[in-house]
Amino acid sequence: MAPIGVDEWVARSGDRRERHGGWRGGFARVDERLGWWPRLLLVGVAAFVYGEFIANGNINFAQTGFNVVLYALLALGLNIVVGWAGLLDLGYIAFFGAGAYVYAMFSSHAFGNLAAGTGGVILPAVASIPIAVVGVAVLGLLIGLVALRLSGDYLAIVTLFVGQAFAEAVNSVAPSTLGGANGLFGLNNFQVGNAMIGSTIGYYWFAVIALLVLMALLHLLDTSRTGRAWRAVRDDPLAAEAMSIPVNRVKVMAFTFGAAVAALAGTVFAAQQSSVFSTNFSANTLILIYACLVLGGAGSISGAVLGGVVVTVAQQLLTSPLDSAYLFYGVLIIALVARVRPWRHLAAVVAGIIAFGLATRAIVGAISARAVAGSPGSAGWFAHALKHFVIVPSGSPLTYGNVLYIVAIVMLVVVVQLKGVRRLIAVVPTVYIGMCCWEARLTLDPGITAQIMIGAILIVTMAARPQGLLGSRRVEVV
Amino acid sequence: MQIFIQTLVSGLVVGCLYALIALGYTMVYGVLKLLNFAHGDLYMVGAFVGYYVMRWFGGPSALVIPAPLLVVLMMLIAGLGVGALGMGIERFAYRPLRNAPRIAPLITALGISFILEDSVLLLFGGYPRDYSASDYLPFSGSIHIDGVNIWSVQIIVVAVSVVMMFGLRELVNRTLFGKSMRAVASDREAAEMLGINVNRTIALTFFIGSAMAGVAGVMSGLAFGQITNVIGFLAGLKAFTAAVVGGIGSIPGAMIGGLVIGLCESFSSSYISSQYSDLIVFALLIATMLLRPQGVFGRPPLQKV
């Protein structure tokens, strides 16, 4: 553990006191003792095992693996700006997009005749990747210079505008070079001499190596003078300035570094997709990257990577009716186990849910047989198991699911506000209604459900655990 | 001349709507120092509420009540509903984070904005809805000036906006609530020590700001016709620009800023190019930021140590 000051030591005394016993405590102690480099090795081993697993396997698994690593890369870059320097950069997506577009322009016929597919400047990857990274880093430097004049919220809105302006600009400016709404396509693969990366698995390996190298570099940066300066500026810019830290330079540096990492991710993304479209770089993607970072823990390298893994895998799971059921009920069970203590309360709540569900269904079924005649939206054995538990009307009308959705949100809010026994009692119908809503409505529109999930990740993480899964709690020194 | 007047009128209409949204931004920023990213989406929700009120009373073609009453009801229900929604969001999402680091409520606001947008998509689908206001508020009732038709809806938008803005000004300057709101805005802790109910003041501020956004949503539906679940993002962004140009935290600033942005957008799209009107608004924002960061009416903030 890094040496810490007395203030911080005192402020953490509460943490030490409330340390868990049992297996959780044991896990936390092992986790604490594990050094940073062994952790990096663990990530490498996990990536290697997965790479071997997808080597002869399903192309979907390869694509998922690539997406995971890509979002981990993006979250790492965002972590520099948001997690370390504390600048809320909502134009991060523009740097990702710019990297992809610069690579695309030097790997297609963008500078020649786009329609005929001839001419243009086509560079090998060893040249175009550095051009993209450096060029976008300079762009980040310029935007950072403007941002210097802005504090906190103003920065957020100006960068949000930058992100929006980027998408609009590539869509409408110079369609003969940037391709307009059609985007640029038919991009060349990464190629060095005769060696060419030609498959998703190849890009997976490339991205994994980039990720590991970047994690190591960023760790060195984090523990360096610059890393400490970033955190000082984040926690208190005024005090940092008083300690003779060049606040402005440090902020611009964070912007530039973040932009460079995003650009690198952009080049890999463009080459793997072999095309770029302005819609790839929308606000939705930005929020997705934020969800990765916030969930994993802003300010922590391993947190950013973990967030990338969790969010991307969850998104992938939602696309299949069976996997999404595993995800939903898995999260439900984890939430209940983690929040309802001790065990006899948990047992009572679970028994209550089962009893409440069966009773409600029996009553509704007695009133109208059609109201319970529908089949759940989940697939596989979930559908069989839940057929006689949840209430889904025949044909599963949207209005029913929509009403349940609103009711479920209201009840969730109520549960959060209640305390003690009342909360335990209110949890029972909330979980049941949530299950009905999931089976009757949310599984029918997995795309929208995924978006709602990302928004929920942001809100729930901020309310329940602002430091994220792996981040360390901010110490407020008064 | 004809084009000029037409542009002026449409600029005024758009500007009034931006001003109404910007007022909510600026009030919330004033009392909480929070940039409420979800504010633009409240405007969108208001537009949807108004649409369903209209459908409930017989849709555009078979109205069961007179059209003026319908318009009043649409605005009233959307205002109250969206106001309550905004108050709920403050109560359940922002209030627990009031003492958290600055970045936490901002990220929560992003999440709320995302959830509102996608919940509307889930509940009502992604296809555009049409208010078809010309069916029940016909063009025949329009005023002619120099060969330009000014549609009754445009007059309604401007009139309602002006009434609401003046109402708000009186509320803030003349009433006890306005006084406590100003007190909370200038120093929350001191206001609390003086016995002002800070939570209630903030909740009411959210209610008023969100209600104005909701009414603006209904009026945008009446004036422009089509609404979708994504209209809130860009409108919110521009309204925020208006708030910044006028000086964030300043109520007259938000009104003037809204009008400036609206006119700017309207004139640049009819005289320069509609493609670049967004970029021109953006350039205006950057210029304000660089030349006069506190905005036209704002005062430079004092930094407390």
Image (cartoon, rainbow, N blue to C red):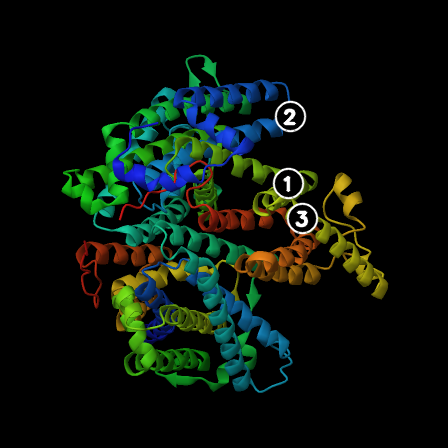
Residue A405 higher or lower than A36, as above or below: below
Residue A330 circle label: 1
Q: Nearer the viewer, mark 2 or mark 3?
A: 3
Q: Secondary structure at mark 2?
A: loop
| Circle 3 SS class | helix
- The local secondary structure at tag 1 comes to helix
Q: Position of residue A180 (x, y in %)?
A: 43, 44
Quick one: A450 or B129, which is closer to the camera? A450
- Residue A424 drawn at (x, y percent): 62, 55
Marks 1 and 2 on same chain: yes
Foreground label between 1 and 3: 1
Question: Measured along the vertical axis of the image, is residue A51 above or below residue B39?
Answer: above
Q: Nearer the viewer, residue A268 or A434?
A: A434
Q: Amino acid at mark 3?
A: Thr
Q: What is the spatial separation of the Cα atoms under label 2 and label 3, in whole angstroms?
A: 24 Å
Place of residue A377 in the rendered image (x, y in percent of width and height, measured from the top left): 72, 48
Binning the other alpha carbons within 10 Å of mark 1 as few (below 14), some (14 to 19) or many (20 upward) gives few
Q: Are marks 1 and 3 in contact (CB under 8 Å)?
A: no
- Disc 2: host chain: A
Say if residue B11 shows up in the picture. Answer: yes
At 45% from the left and 32% from the top, the residue drawn is A305
Please tell me whether residue A125 is drawn above or below residue A260 in the rendered image.
above
Q: Which kind of residue does numbered mark 2 sit on?
A: Asn
On residue B235, the disc is none
Q: Position of residue B123 (x, y in %)?
A: 61, 60
| In this rendering, position of residue B170 left or right of residue B289 | right
Q: Which residue is mark 2?
A: A58
